[in-house]
Amino acid sequence: MKSLKFISFCLSLALCVSCNAQDNKEDQIKMALLAAPVEVRDGAHVYGFDEDGKFITLREGTNGFIVRSDDPNQEGFEVVCYGVDAEPFMARGRDLKSKGKGRAEILNIREEEAEAGTLKMPNYGSVLHIYYGQNAKYNPDTEEIEGASYRYVIYTPKATQASTGLPLRPNGPGHPWLMFPGTHRAHIMITPPEGN
């Protein structure tokens, strides 16, 4: 009789853990989708993290957009959305990071590969949406991200100030500017003022 009670207890515990894992998966999907434009959320591919912090697919996509949940292994908070055209570039960064490469080394390797034509770059004008904040967090009760800011990164590989007409630093809050001009990772940055 005692052994039956023990087995019943273990099964209940396993079901409870499974429910928590499922809730976590659903919360990750909900938080990741908040980085995407409303019109593409339903069909976006969702990446997230399992209980061990391993990068995984949480939901298959159907519309050419990808979102990624906040990485629990990193400081601060960040969820992102980007087009499928940027996935080879993103995947290469993840691969190099998983092999112990640091940020500077990853940037250099991808620069070399982009120059050699072996790394597919995001399309010119492809947009990365970033919802971020050092102390931001997702509130599962309200299904909102609290304390975060939004940023747009528009990929413009090899773009320069002359080719875009943009300044190399923002003229004011929320103004677009060109970062890393002339390189494979040149992009237009737009950071709306906080609260917008």
Image (cartoon, rainbow, N blue to C red):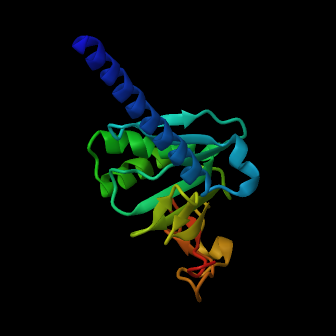
Relative to 77, residue 54 above or below: above
Q: Position of residue 160 (x, y in %)?
A: 59, 70
Q: Nearer the viewer, residue 19 or 112?
A: 19
Identify which residue is drawn at 29% across, 12% down: 4
| Quadrant, the N terminus | top left
Q: Position of residue 173 (x, y in %)?
A: 58, 86
In the image, 83: left or right of 6?
right
Q: Quadrant of residue 188?
A: bottom right
In the image, 105: left or right of 186?
left
In the image, 65: left or right of 89?
right
| Quadrant, the C terminus | bottom right
- Residue farthest to the left, as pictured: 2
Relative to 143, residue 26 above or below: above
The reply to whether residue 120 is visible in this rendering is no
Identify which residue is drawn at 49% across, 68% down: 180
Identify which residue is drawn at 52% across, 55% down: 140
Q: Nearer the viewer, residue 92 or 44?
A: 44
Q: Position of residue 36 (x, y in %)?
A: 65, 55
Q: Position of residue 63 (x, y in %)?
A: 72, 40
- Residue farthest to the front, as pictured: 1
Identify which residue is drawn at 40% across, 33% down: 16
